[in-house]
Image: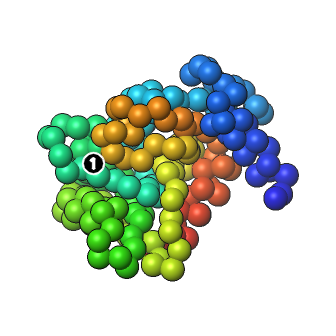
Amino acid sequence: MDRPMKRYLIPAILLISGLAVSSEVIQTTPSLSVVFLKNHEYFHRLVREIRQSREEIDIAMFLFKIKGRPGNRAEVLAEELVKAAKRGVKVRLVLERSSDPNDTVTSDNRETALVLKEGGVEVGFDSLRKRSHSKLVVVDSRLTFIGSHNFTEAALKYNNEASVLIDSPEYALRTRQFILSLIR
């Protein structure tokens, strides 16, 4: 692993592993800050950053499940992504799929993809050869959300989840490149 990537990953791994217990910003270099987001803090911060986005949002998500009760948090995220696309933000999403016809992740993701495509979001699916378990969001080539949160009501409201928000154009670029490499 090259030195710049290691400099970014080590603080993120420490935070996700539970070594940080609050939502404080940890300044690691002048051009990098990391915020630990536990449980519902992730949802609220992500919604805020989507609403403030101006250029692009790139997402790789294992599971994005909007079916269920109207207004649940995953549906709110879907609505915010559509609103962003309608105001001119380029929104791209890569979702997991498999060749197993009984796989509920694939069927849930396909249902979400249809709704988002109708709203102007570019949606692609990963390769059938390799499972993509990523949960990544890059906003405006600067902010990177990475962690355990899927886009489901359970993950965004009820589960114990941990993610980080990394403010670094360099890290965002690398993450965005990875997300775009998943599109098939």
Tell me which residue sits at (71%, 35%) in the image.
14
Rendered view: 20 above or below 147:
above
**Picture coordinates of residue 119, whole percent (x, y):** 21, 57
**Picture coordinates of residue 77, whole percent (x, y):** 30, 43
Name which quarter of the figure residue 90 lies in: bottom left
Amino acid tagged 1: Ala
Rendered view: 21 above or below 80:
above
Quadrant (top left/top right/bottom left/bottom right) for the C terminus: bottom left
Does residue 128 show up?
A: yes
**Going by the image, does 151 lie left or right of 132?**
left
Asked whether 67 or 24 is in front, the reply is 67
**Picture coordinates of residue 63, whole percent (x, y):** 38, 55
Name which quarter of the figure residue 118 lies in: bottom left
Tell me which residue sits at (33%, 45%) in the image.
152
Label 1 sits on a secondary structure element that is helix
Tell me which residue sits at (39%, 74%) in the image.
98
User: What residue did someone put label 1 on?
Assistant: 78
**Going by the image, does 34 lie left or right of 89?**
right
